[in-house]
Amino acid sequence: MSETNPRLLYPDAAESYWLRQAEAITQLQENDAIERLTPSVAQLSDLFTTERPEKNFPDYFNNPEQLAAYGLFFLPQSFVRTAFAMSQALDFRKWQPPQKAIRILDLGSGPGSCGTSAAWQLQERFSSAVDLSFVDRSPSALVAAENFAQAVLKNTTKISSRIGDASRPETWQPGSFDIIIAGFVLNEMSRLTEKDLLQWVQSMSKALNPGGLILILEPALKITSERLQRLSDSVVLHKIISRIGPDLDDSPCPQLATGIHWSHEVRAWTIPSATELINRKLHRDLREIRFSFSAFSNQSLPPVPTNALRIVSDIQIIKGLVRFIGIGRGALQTIEISTRGLSKHDIKIKAASIERGDTVAHSLPVASKVRLPDFDSLQIIWSGQS
């Protein structure tokens, strides 16, 4: 695998902020504070998975220990997931900020992971002045989001927040925005119908400046990923706004038709030290971050190469072959790459150079199964790691 893009790393200032919060809340020094908060991380993990409520989530951000625990363990993952989605838009699709001073709206912001990540990306890449607005139902989360963003972002940033509902446009900040992010909130809108969700995306589109970007991120679970994919396909069908990612064209996702596999990203990342320390007791598999996302824009962008494929499966190493599944031109393709003549070490390096979610291409005719003679026959168009 290539060296990690430094823009996809979790910034030191972000981790430092939550470590100081943990120390202040527990009145303990760094490692002891982390150990004290580990049970709260386990409680939140259960809440998000096995004990997930069918209706309303409790306001766990109102509990200082749970807020700090979230900031140390879960927030870095959402921050980096957003960075990957932004990289796809910026580095692959060549989306550009439409102006030097960027307005960002973070819907259902929680303590600010997604909006702050997007703003940090823009400052790192373009030295942009950013007007960052948070919307959430939790007053405690909004206070945390403002403080966190101030700690991570440069002084050119204007930060504000508003108590509101991500699903109700009338509660959002007024005005128009260059980027609107809805990070991990769609799964909490279980009562909204497909028609409701289309109107929700349409409301975001109406609040978008010319050349703007919409990002919707969701967990990588089958139910959440498929719901987002159906919404994304429906947005394209009803021509509400142009889709720019991760799908390569306007074709419906063929994985929805089979109902077996579902579209999501699997990305290697550098685990922050505090997160890793907590995980020594929790034993979660944090080697990769998993998520699904959809990106839309009203900006005219360069076309995707017609022979491009998006990798939608894990990379398998089998006898004599590296195999994966891709989607191109609205169809599934199984790609098999011969590894004859390569050592086991070289095969692992070659296989690790691509990930689920990358965009690749080959020059052979389109078919349901394509056998490539070697890795040199595979063109990597965009990799989340480079």
Image (cartoon, rainbow, N blue to C red):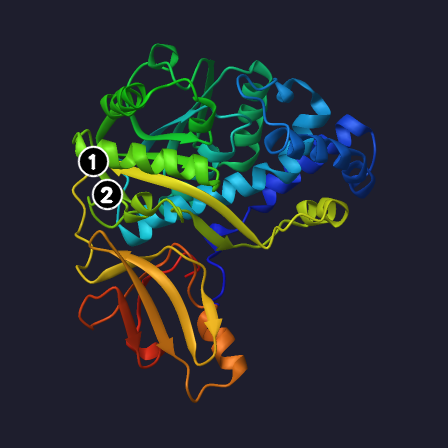
Residue 227 occupies quadrant? top left
Count residues near mark 1 (Cα–Cα under 10 Å), then give few for <14, some for 14-19, many for 20+: some
Q: Is residue 147 above or below residue 95?
A: above
In this figure, which residue is indicated by the disc labeled 2? Answer: 252
Disc 1 and disc 2: Cα gap in Å? 9 Å
Given the image, on which type of amino acid does mark 1 rest? Val
**Mark earlier in primary sequence (1, 2):** 1
Q: Is residue 60 above or below residue 42?
A: above
In this figure, which residue is indicated by the disc labeled 1? Answer: 236
Instruction: Determine if residue 211 is in view.
Output: no
Residue at image coords 45%, 27%: 185
Q: Is residue 114 above or below residue 191?
A: below
Image quadrant where one finds the C terminus: bottom left
Residue 334, percent across and down? Answer: 32, 65
Residue 267, percent across and down? Answer: 48, 54
Asked if residue 239 lies left or right of residue 39, the reply is: left
Q: Nearer the viewer, residue 103 or 259?
A: 259
Given the image, on which type of amino acid does mark 2 rest? Pro
Residue 122, percent across and down? Answer: 38, 41
Count residues near mark 2 (Cα–Cα under 10 Å), then give few for <14, some for 14-19, many for 20+: some
Element type at marker 1? helix
Residue at image coords 44%, 22%: 190
